[in-house]
Image (spheres, rainbow, N blue to C red):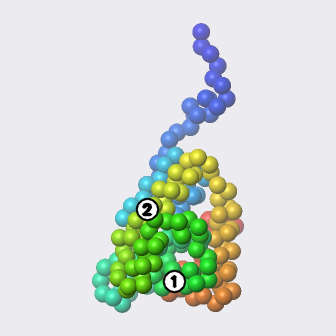
Amino acid sequence: MLQPRRPNEQRHALRSRVTIGYCSSDILLWKAAGATNGATGKFFDLRRFTRTRFDEPVRGGGQLEYWFEQSLMAFLRQSDLQRASRVDVLSDVSRQSPCYDSVVQQIGTGKAWLALGWRQYMHWFRQTESAIQERVPDVDAVLAQAEDNWEVLKAKKVLMEEVANDGRWLRPWRGR
Protein backbone atom coordinates (compact mmCIF):
# COMPACT_ATOMS: atom_id res chain seq x y z
CA MET A 1 0.00 0.00 0.00
CA LEU A 2 1.33 3.43 -0.92
CA GLN A 3 1.89 5.82 1.93
CA PRO A 4 1.22 9.55 1.46
CA ARG A 5 4.29 11.71 1.59
CA ARG A 6 4.84 14.03 4.46
CA PRO A 7 4.75 17.73 3.46
CA ASN A 8 8.56 18.19 3.53
CA GLU A 9 9.16 15.06 1.48
CA GLN A 10 6.68 16.18 -1.15
CA ARG A 11 8.19 19.66 -1.43
CA HIS A 12 11.68 18.18 -1.75
CA ALA A 13 10.58 15.64 -4.36
CA LEU A 14 9.11 18.37 -6.57
CA ARG A 15 12.13 20.64 -6.36
CA SER A 16 14.69 20.37 -9.13
CA ARG A 17 18.36 20.77 -8.42
CA VAL A 18 19.69 23.79 -10.31
CA THR A 19 23.32 24.80 -10.70
CA ILE A 20 24.01 28.31 -11.94
CA GLY A 21 27.23 28.55 -13.91
CA TYR A 22 29.17 31.71 -14.61
CA CYS A 23 27.99 33.67 -11.61
CA SER A 24 29.81 35.98 -9.26
CA SER A 25 28.47 38.24 -6.53
CA ASP A 26 25.02 37.57 -7.96
CA ILE A 27 25.23 34.18 -6.22
CA LEU A 28 23.21 35.84 -3.45
CA LEU A 29 20.36 36.49 -5.86
CA TRP A 30 20.47 33.06 -7.45
CA LYS A 31 20.53 31.21 -4.14
CA ALA A 32 17.70 33.35 -2.74
CA ALA A 33 15.71 32.46 -5.86
CA GLY A 34 16.17 28.77 -5.11
CA ALA A 35 19.28 27.69 -7.02
CA THR A 36 20.95 24.65 -5.48
CA ASN A 37 24.55 25.47 -6.42
CA GLY A 38 26.61 28.18 -8.04
CA ALA A 39 29.79 27.99 -10.08
CA THR A 40 32.38 30.64 -10.73
CA GLY A 41 35.94 30.82 -11.94
CA LYS A 42 38.58 32.70 -13.83
CA PHE A 43 36.31 33.15 -16.84
CA PHE A 44 34.62 35.95 -14.93
CA ASP A 45 36.05 39.16 -16.34
CA LEU A 46 36.47 41.43 -13.34
CA ARG A 47 37.06 44.49 -15.47
CA ARG A 48 33.43 44.42 -16.66
CA PHE A 49 32.31 46.33 -19.73
CA THR A 50 33.10 49.90 -18.80
CA ARG A 51 35.03 52.37 -20.92
CA THR A 52 38.15 51.77 -18.86
CA ARG A 53 38.04 48.13 -19.95
CA PHE A 54 39.13 49.16 -23.43
CA ASP A 55 41.91 51.50 -22.33
CA GLU A 56 45.42 50.18 -22.10
CA PRO A 57 46.37 49.50 -18.49
CA VAL A 58 48.89 51.97 -17.11
CA ARG A 59 51.24 49.15 -16.09
CA GLY A 60 51.11 47.46 -19.49
CA GLY A 61 49.16 44.40 -20.61
CA GLY A 62 47.66 41.74 -18.42
CA GLN A 63 45.09 41.51 -15.70
CA LEU A 64 44.78 43.86 -12.77
CA GLU A 65 44.46 42.87 -9.14
CA TYR A 66 40.97 43.03 -7.66
CA TRP A 67 39.57 42.44 -4.20
CA PHE A 68 35.95 41.41 -3.76
CA GLU A 69 34.39 43.46 -0.98
CA GLN A 70 31.16 42.02 0.40
CA SER A 71 30.23 45.20 2.26
CA LEU A 72 29.97 46.98 -1.11
CA MET A 73 29.14 43.91 -3.24
CA ALA A 74 31.88 45.11 -5.56
CA PHE A 75 35.29 44.30 -6.97
CA LEU A 76 37.84 46.90 -5.91
CA ARG A 77 41.11 47.81 -7.55
CA GLN A 78 44.11 48.20 -5.28
CA SER A 79 43.73 51.96 -4.90
CA ASP A 80 40.00 51.57 -4.17
CA LEU A 81 40.69 48.85 -1.61
CA GLN A 82 43.06 51.24 0.14
CA ARG A 83 40.45 54.04 0.04
CA ALA A 84 37.70 51.78 1.40
CA SER A 85 39.88 50.51 4.22
CA ARG A 86 40.74 54.08 5.28
CA VAL A 87 37.01 54.86 5.57
CA ASP A 88 36.52 51.58 7.44
CA VAL A 89 33.78 50.02 5.30
CA LEU A 90 35.53 46.67 4.84
CA SER A 91 33.45 43.75 6.08
CA ASP A 92 34.48 41.33 8.79
CA VAL A 93 34.30 38.66 6.08
CA SER A 94 37.08 40.52 4.24
CA ARG A 95 39.23 41.18 7.27
CA GLN A 96 38.97 37.51 8.28
CA SER A 97 39.89 36.24 4.80
CA PRO A 98 43.01 34.06 4.85
CA CYS A 99 44.38 36.32 2.08
CA TYR A 100 43.78 39.69 3.76
CA ASP A 101 47.11 40.03 5.61
CA SER A 102 49.06 38.77 2.60
CA VAL A 103 47.37 41.25 0.26
CA VAL A 104 47.98 44.14 2.67
CA GLN A 105 51.64 43.09 2.91
CA GLN A 106 51.99 42.77 -0.89
CA ILE A 107 50.43 46.21 -1.40
CA GLY A 108 52.92 47.63 1.09
CA THR A 109 55.86 46.25 -0.89
CA GLY A 110 54.46 47.29 -4.27
CA LYS A 111 54.40 43.68 -5.51
CA ALA A 112 51.56 42.33 -7.62
CA TRP A 113 48.89 40.31 -5.80
CA LEU A 114 46.77 39.00 -8.69
CA ALA A 115 46.86 35.37 -7.49
CA LEU A 116 46.00 36.41 -3.93
CA GLY A 117 43.07 38.43 -5.25
CA TRP A 118 41.73 35.38 -7.07
CA ARG A 119 42.18 33.26 -3.95
CA GLN A 120 40.36 35.85 -1.85
CA TYR A 121 37.45 35.99 -4.31
CA MET A 122 37.21 32.19 -4.60
CA HIS A 123 37.35 31.88 -0.80
CA TRP A 124 34.56 34.47 -0.47
CA PHE A 125 32.46 32.66 -3.08
CA ARG A 126 32.89 29.23 -1.45
CA GLN A 127 32.25 30.59 2.02
CA THR A 128 29.20 32.55 0.90
CA GLU A 129 27.67 29.70 -1.06
CA SER A 130 28.20 27.33 1.87
CA ALA A 131 26.62 29.78 4.30
CA ILE A 132 23.65 30.23 1.99
CA GLN A 133 23.24 26.42 1.75
CA GLU A 134 22.55 26.42 5.46
CA ARG A 135 20.45 29.58 5.67
CA VAL A 136 19.32 31.94 2.93
CA PRO A 137 20.08 35.42 4.24
CA ASP A 138 17.77 38.38 3.92
CA VAL A 139 19.28 39.32 0.56
CA ASP A 140 17.54 42.69 0.54
CA ALA A 141 19.15 43.52 3.89
CA VAL A 142 22.62 42.56 2.59
CA LEU A 143 22.12 44.68 -0.53
CA ALA A 144 20.62 47.58 1.45
CA GLN A 145 23.68 47.56 3.73
CA ALA A 146 25.94 47.62 0.68
CA GLU A 147 23.99 50.60 -0.69
CA ASP A 148 24.38 52.34 2.67
CA ASN A 149 28.13 51.72 2.56
CA TRP A 150 28.33 53.29 -0.89
CA GLU A 151 26.54 56.31 0.58
CA VAL A 152 29.16 56.46 3.36
CA LEU A 153 31.89 56.56 0.71
CA LYS A 154 30.01 59.26 -1.18
CA ALA A 155 29.45 61.36 1.97
CA LYS A 156 33.16 61.13 2.79
CA LYS A 157 33.97 62.13 -0.80
CA VAL A 158 35.80 58.89 -1.56
CA LEU A 159 36.11 58.64 -5.34
CA MET A 160 36.84 55.26 -6.87
CA GLU A 161 39.44 54.90 -9.60
CA GLU A 162 36.89 53.31 -11.90
CA VAL A 163 34.07 55.85 -12.17
CA ALA A 164 31.42 53.20 -12.87
CA ASN A 165 32.29 51.45 -9.59
CA ASP A 166 29.72 53.31 -7.52
CA GLY A 167 27.16 50.73 -6.41
CA ARG A 168 24.44 51.70 -8.91
CA TRP A 169 23.84 48.03 -9.79
CA LEU A 170 22.50 47.35 -6.30
CA ARG A 171 19.17 49.16 -6.76
CA PRO A 172 18.05 46.98 -9.70
CA TRP A 173 19.16 43.91 -7.75
CA ARG A 174 16.84 45.00 -4.96
CA GLY A 175 13.99 45.26 -7.47
CA ARG A 176 13.29 48.94 -6.98
Q: Residue shown at 31%/79% (left/top)? A: 62
- Name the residue beneath numbered marker 2: 122
Which sits in the foreground, 143 or 48?
143
Image location (x, y in percent) of residue 110: 37, 86
Q: Residue shown at 62%/51% (left/top)? A: 136
Other-residue count near label 2 (Cα within 10 Å), few / some / many at <14 / 14–19 / ≥20: some
Q: Residue shown at 64%/71% (left/top)? A: 146
Please report whichever mark, 2 or 1, sits nearer to the chain's N-terminal start.
Answer: 1
Q: Is residue 40 left or right of residue 139?
A: left
Other-residue count near label 1 (Cα within 10 Å), few / some / many at <14 / 14–19 / ≥20: some
- Name the residue beneath numbered marker 1: 82
Camera sees residue 45: no
Q: CA distance from mark 2 to mark 1?
A: 20 Å
Badge 2 marks a residue whose secondary structure is helix
Image location (x, y in percent) of residue 126: 47, 56
Toward the left, the furthest residue is: 61
Q: Residue shown at 40%/68% (left/top)? A: 118
Q: Quadrant of residue 70?
A: bottom right
Give the number of the mark in front: 2 or 1.
Answer: 1
Which sits in the foreground, 129 or 165?
129
The quarter of the picture where the C terminus appears is: bottom right
Query: Mark 1 belongs to which amino acid?
Result: Gln
Query: Mark 2 belongs to which amino acid?
Result: Met
Q: Is residue 55 left or right of residue 176?
A: left
Image location (x, y in percent) of residue 120: 44, 66
Q: Is residue 33 above or below residue 63?
A: above
